[in-house]
Amino acid sequence: MARAGLTAERLTLAAAELADELGFHNLTVSALARRFGVKPAALYSHVRDAQELRVRVAVLALAELAERAAAALAGRAGKDALVAFADAYRGYAKEHPGRYAAGQIQLDDETAYASAARRHAEMTRAILRGYDLPEPAQTDAVRMLHSTFHGFVSLETQGGFARTPREVDVSWARTLDALDSVLRNWPPDEPGGQAA
Amino acid sequence: MARAGLTAERLTLAAAELADELGFHNLTVSALARRFGVKPAALYSHVRDAQELRVRVAVLALAELAERAAAALAGRAGKDALVAFADAYRGYAKEHPGRYAAGQIQLDDETAYASAARRHAEMTRAILRGYDLPEPAQTDAVRMLHSTFHGFVSLETQGGFARTPREVDVSWARTLDALDSVLRNWPPDEPGGQAA
DNA sequence: GCAAATGCTTAAAGGCTTTAAGTGATGGAG
DNA sequence: CTCCATCACTTAAAGCCTTTAAGCATTTGC
């Protein structure tokens, strides 16, 4: 019997494809083995267990996403940078829903540190350079941006916006307009009240 | 042997508790049966299968969340309403992470229609009444608000903000300030450019 | 060309889901 | 009050998944 030529890397890549096709939660050792025409037990020489497989896909996804985001950001500033980054983020999630879902799992501190998670934070801060926010506000803005991107993409891929006719692309664009607007005019720490 | 007195309702409630304790993805028929001191097969007289159990928890969660949000909204308007609604949303997710996660699963159109999903959309629109947005922008704003709330809460419960020292509560408050600000000053359809 | 290492299979145990058939408790009718 | 029908739960069993251990075969290096 010819060997299948399994390695941790090939398994990870195939697992990522499987996740994109079937959904991350349908990524199983058995399904992956099937794809290689091999018995499930064969995978355990290359990967400790199912959880390690998931973590590997997560790390791959974070790296790919960081790569894309970095490319999108290159040479841009201000709103251009904001939109390019956001579009890269959303585009990746739509092209690779399984990988994107993988990227959301909890990584232990060590794995997260070694992964591209840091690069994401740095890039988001790079966007904010165009908006000139002082430090504590900058952290808040990073969190708000990340929340909005992730929330929108996550709701969209789960069909959360499907029941309203308006084009999702338009709402996305308007949301980015709104984020740009609020970053250019970040509210002061003591809000002055809510007068019209 | 005394009977356990199972009903679909009691199972659903216990399933919700189980999900909050162990995480939604650890909600299994077996674990639930164990909690009632009963064999797994016993549950199948009351609930069609594991998926129905999950859907029931989702519908329960959406209803509870709508209840809370409605109470928070009562008698408030403008930023007060925004903050109360958002806090109710986040509070529920933190108190009931398993239920909250359940609320994110895809419901078929019929179930979704019968569920509280509509009430959520209506309440978000009610918040916007205080901000006087014309219609297509209103839909965009609803989507942005929902995205930001969901994204923030989802990242927070998954530990996404844990690696930065700043208090998450403060970032949440500042994010709501920012949303209030952008709603009061919603950008026009043709953005005028990005001058400082 | 042979031995050692490596890669995959077989075997097996344990858990989860789900269906079908069986048993015992409960409650309503006489 | 008692008997019987119904309903609630158990037992049994099949199928799929994960994971470990042991075995066989293929490749590699000397």
Image (spheres, coloured by chain):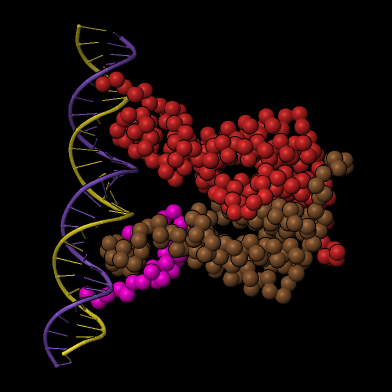
Chain colours: A red, B brown, C yellow, D purple
Over which residues does the magenta segment extend?
Answer: B1-30
Q: Residue at x 37, y 57 (%)?
A: B50
Which picture quadrant has residue B174? bottom right
Is residue A165 among what the camera can see? yes
Main secondary structure of the magenta stretch = helix
Percent of width and height locating residue A38? 31, 30
Looking at the image, residue B68 lies above or below residue B187:
below
Query: In the rendered structure, does residue B2 fall within the stretch colored magenta?
Result: yes
Q: Residue at x 77, y 65 (%)?
A: B130
Q: Residue at x 52, y 43 (%)?
A: A101
Q: Residue at x 81, y 50 (%)?
A: B187
Of residues A113 and A65, the one drawn nearer to the viewer in this rendering: A65
Looking at the image, residue B170 lies above or below residue A3:
below
Percent of width and height locating residue A22? 44, 40
B160 horizontally vs B176: left or right:
left
User: Which quarter of the figure is the N terminus of chain B placed in?
Assistant: bottom left
Percent of width and height locating residue B191? 82, 44
A81 horizontally vs C13: left or right:
right
A95 horizontally vs B191: left or right:
left
Query: In the rendered structure, does residue B59 fall within the stretch colored magenta?
Result: no
Looking at the image, residue B120 lies above or below residue A114:
below
